[in-house]
Image (cartoon, rainbow, N blue to C red):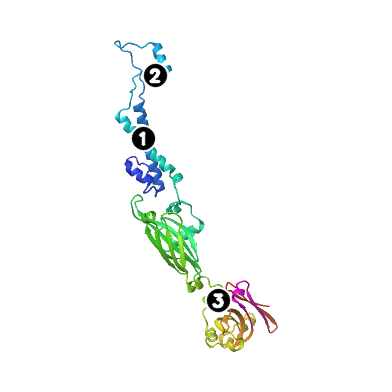
Amino acid sequence: MSDDLSTATQQQLEVWAFGRQGVVTDRELAEAALRELARRAALVREAAATEMHPARLSLPVSASAPAADDNSASHDDDDGSETDARPRGMSGRSRVVVAIAIVTALVIAVFVAQPLLRVGPPGSLDVFDRPFTSEERDLLRLLQSKGQTVSVGPRVLGVAEFGTVMAYRQITGNPVAPDRDVVCLAVSEFDRRLEVVQIADWQCVDRDLVQSEGAEVTLVGLGGTYQVSWGPRGDALIEVSVSEAQRLAMDPGFESIFIDAPASDLDEWYIIEQPLLAQSGLLIENMRNSFPLARLLAEPGTVLTDAQLEGGEWIAAYTAVPPDGSDRLVCIGVLTEGVQAESDCVTVDDFSRSPLLLGFERFGRSITVSWAASGELSVLVG
């Protein structure tokens, strides 16, 4: 943008400098317009001073004009009386020039003092005036990777449940009269299956509407439905509705073992046929037969086929409930063809406070199985 705005009209300069409703949209253009207004005001004041206080010129004394004596001249200077040719009042043109100078100076003063006079919360769009955070720079790259045009932002408006709600602007065309100037609201979430942050949804609203009335949008994500109310002043209000299925998908905790790995035919057999009910008195909800003991105890370099593992012992993690519907249990067991050799169970509440451990021996070797509240199942063979 050129800083030479000398040919612009006074009205156009004021629009650039003060924006609509006193909100500046293009700070660089506003500052240039403000400088031009100040320059014009200075010229007006200089012209007014020249009209009100004309310079005294040294003119030769005419032969027909009586010369004033030195004493009278000195007396006039001492008592400050107006005995020279100064006008006793201002002309109509002088009054207009002075009025323009005063009005312009007042407008500039109001613009400069505006942040100090503002009452109540700041305008919502002021969020774009602050610097980026490192998180927002990452979100900018993510938006761009999704094909989003970002002219200003993004800025994080808030975090609710599993989502981060952000705002950014899309501007195309002339900055003074753009073809498109919208504010977009989007939500990002961490996708566990892909192990990446994803932009789940976005919606855009005309900037003038956000500034005058605010924005009300609904964003649908993997981990919930986000109702966002933002503007025209203050922070965003974010309300989120999360279903049990969404919560389990976003934060499965110890049950991630059942989500991240598909159930095998053997797992399905234990769940459908319930062979452990008579022995343990428990109904199996979910199960993963994760480690075949034969493979854990084999000599290094030994390769065992699935057929060789069939019918052998497996280390399994499962959840179960007693038939009476009492406390849900988290269990580790050593199973073979529907029979459980060793096992240990704790309630879900107890499991959330400390990992579940099962220790046993096979062929003179100690084996320790650990199931963490984060869902990780690990085996240590001694």
Q: Which residue is drawn at 32% across and 31% down?
A: 95
Which of disc 3 and disc 2 is earlier in sequence?
2
Q: What stretch is highlighted in magenta?
A: 343-360
Is residue 166 one of those drawn in magenta?
no
Provide the residue designation for mark 1: 101
Q: Quadrant of residue 345?
A: bottom right
Task: Give the side of residue 314 with respect to residue 235, left or right.
Answer: right
- Residue 298 percent coordinates (x, y): 64, 82
User: Compared to 370, does 114 lie above or below?
Assistant: above
- Residue 165 percent coordinates (x, y): 46, 61
Front-lying residue, 92 or 134: 92
Amino acid type of the residue that numbered disc 3 sits on in the rendered structure: Ile
Helix, strand or loop status at disc 2:
loop
Amino acid type of the residue that numbered disc 1 sits on in the rendered structure: Ala
Q: Residue at x 55, y 75 (%)?
A: 255
Provide the residue designation for mark 2: 81
User: Compared to 94, does 113 lie above or below?
Assistant: below
Which of disc 3 and disc 1 is earlier in sequence?
1
Q: How far apart are marks 1 and 3 (CA)?
A: 76 Å
Camera-near label (2 vs 1) is: 2
Report the disc number at residue 257: 3
